Image: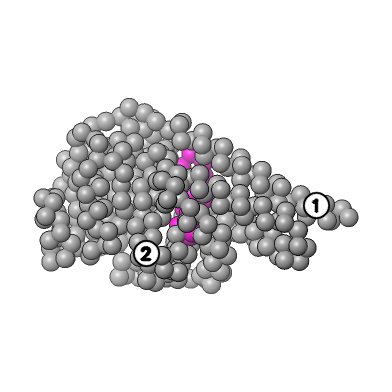
Amino acid sequence: MLISEILLLLPVLADLLIVYQVVQEVKLRSSVKGNYKGFTSVIIPVRGIDVNAECNIRSLLNQDYKDYEVIYVVDDIKDPIVDVLKKYNIKVVVAESVCEECSGKIKAQLTGLKYAKGDIIVFGDSDTYYPRHWLKELVSPLSDYVATTVFSWPKPYKFSLKNLIRAGFWTFGFESQAVGGTFLWGGSMAFRRDFFSVDVIEDLKKQWCDDCTLSRIAKQRGKIGFVFKAMPLNVFDENDLIRWSKRQILTVRIYSNKGYKGFLIVSVFFALFLALLLILHNLVFISPFFMWISKNIIRGLNSGIKYSIIPSIMSVPAIFFTLFVAIISYKEKYIFWRGKVYKV
């Protein structure tokens, strides 16, 4: 009898923890703010033509921020995206050999930094759609934080099985963030120009992971502000789901190990709830799944209810998919990214 009562208590406790998480995130939405402003350089490394490319480009050019420039950095001037960018009269530079050991993305970022005129530096991604208020919201809190960031909400380009699973998986990027934002996401991160001292640039030249390295340095210098209001949309059409998922899992495991361990604990409990539901036929064990979906719907509302629902529903099967990927990638030491292999 006692064991049965304890088992029935577990999903109730899980529900309460999810409610607590929602409350903390709602508080966070209004707590990270400021009034910082200045001429801003938005640097976008790009390779090839992403799905939704022109909409993403127009979203960057249509920001309600007064003084800013957009710089796209390509690996090769013959890249087909260059002709698209020329239509919008965007500044395009070719990545220079600024480092030997660093990744192609860091090489592009450092090249963009070299040509940037801004007092504020913002790094973004080419596969992301940015709402009009994104830049203003992201930059403003720099008056109180050493860096600011926000994770994006997933927007599958079409409803294939791979895209739906990735959409659910993508929501875990929020779970890997401690409340207050302790990990910079490469698709939205802002800094004051003086952040990039000689030491920081030299450190980046030896790394493959841009946001991992910048997160480490930023946390050494102060606090990172997580700006929920600036949430953009990550637009994708996934073709290699397992390889992509492995890279995400390995990156979190190595550079945000607390988040990785936290996910493993959560996934084990959800597996337990599913097993108990099937064995005991008691619907109380299904409540954490509904609470989990509801929590994600609330998160995604910043991007609109029509984009919020499907990734939130898919975040449940993604729990078990992600656990599977974590198991099969446990001993892996290499990451395949942007055409290169990196040892981690």
Instruction: Determine which residue is flagged by label 1.
Output: 6
Instruction: Indicate whether residue 137 is drawn in magenta.
Output: no
In the image shown, does 286 or 227 lie closer to the viewer? 286
Residue at coordinates 11% horizontally, 50% vertically from top-left?
89
Percent x, y of residue 33: 39, 31
Q: Earlier in the sequence, mark 1 or mark 2?
A: 1
Percent x, y of residue 184: 40, 47
In the image shown, does 57 or 116 lie closer to the viewer? 57
Instruction: Indicate whether residue 170 is drawn in magenta.
Output: yes
Residue at coordinates 31% horizontally, 38% vertically from top-left?
133
The amino acid at mark 2 is Lys
The secondary structure type at the circle numbered 2 is loop
Q: Which range of residues does the magenta coloring cover?
A: 168-182
Residue 291 visible, this orientation: yes
- Quadrant of residue 161 within the rendered picture: bottom left
Percent x, y of residue 125: 30, 53
The amino acid at mark 1 is Ile
Residue at coordinates 41% horizontally, 68% vertically from top-left?
160
Instruction: Determine which residue is flagged by label 2.
Output: 158
Other residues around mark 1 within 10 Å, as few (<14) / some (14–19) / many (≥20) = few
Q: How is the image coloured?
A: one colour
Q: Is residue 40 above or below residue 183?
A: above
